[in-house]
Amino acid sequence: MPYASETLLRASFFDFTALASQPDDIAAHARYLEDGLLTLREGKVVSLESWEIAEGRVDAATVIDLRGKLIVPGFVDTHIHYPQTEMIGAFGEQLLEWLNQYTFPVESQYHCPDHAAQMSAFFLQQLLSNGTTTALVFGTVHKQSVDALFQAAQQLDMRLIAGKVMMDRNAPEYLTETPEESYQDTRELIERWHQRGRLSYALTPRFAPTSSPELLEKSVNCAASSRISGCTPT
């Protein structure tokens, strides 16, 4: 992805200068600049300082003036199902009704690589257009869904953690797998994508009703052999 060699942005900024070891320390690391200058070089942040300090050594003609706007670091979404993008707002009185009537039929389409690729590109653009630059993402039970998502994220050089949903019971037959099938597909995806660029793989059992003890054991085996963590079940 091409970047300008150097970009200077003048605006208001809010960020955190360090990680907080305790919740009570968060406020101490918060920083707000009413009038600041952000320097980007080759797409990466080089510095953030007050305009008062930077003004004397920069050419004002090269500065993009965004005063009146607030710039913050990219948001992080820690739990999101990208196949559900096309059914946002679908009504269901109870979770199982909602899954059976809307979610599972929509997810069945992701066996198709072309559909998965089209929706992956749309999903990531929706995240970025709303300021989310990092996400922990559920795919579907299909390997194709995760391959397409990682491919799209890699093209954007986006930080993404994702996994293939693992489920072997209490779901339509067209979306269930055996524990061994789930293990094999997951292992293949880990080997192909984990720690490739800015991508990471997360083991993703869907939730207790759809995950037998045997499936969860396979998930634990994957974690032990791959030294990776898991998505929070839905």
Image (cartoon, grey):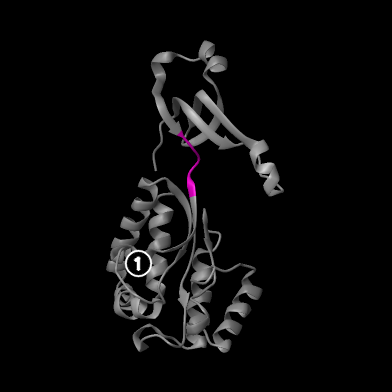
Residue pictured at 60% horizontal, 76% vertical? 222
Report which quarter residue 29 is drawn in: top right
Instruction: Give the residue number, with chain letter if any, for mark 1.
Output: 84
Q: Is residue 77 visible?
A: yes
Frontmost residue, 114 versus 16: 16
Residue farthest along the front direction in this orientation? 93
Image coordinates of residue 164 in percent, x first then y, are 46, 72
Image coordinates of residue 165 in percent, x first then y, are 46, 74
Stretch of the chain drawn in magenta: 71-75
Residue farthest along the right direction in this orientation? 21
Q: Is residue 204 magenta?
A: no
Q: Tag 1: residue type?
A: Gln
Residue pictured at 67% horizontal, 48% vertical? 23
Residue pictured at 34% horizontal, 85% vertical? 174
Question: Label 1: how many residues lie within 10 Å, few (<14), some (14-19) or many (20+)?
Answer: many
Q: Is residue 73 magenta?
A: yes
Left-right relation of 70 to 115: right
Left-right relation of 199 to 61: right
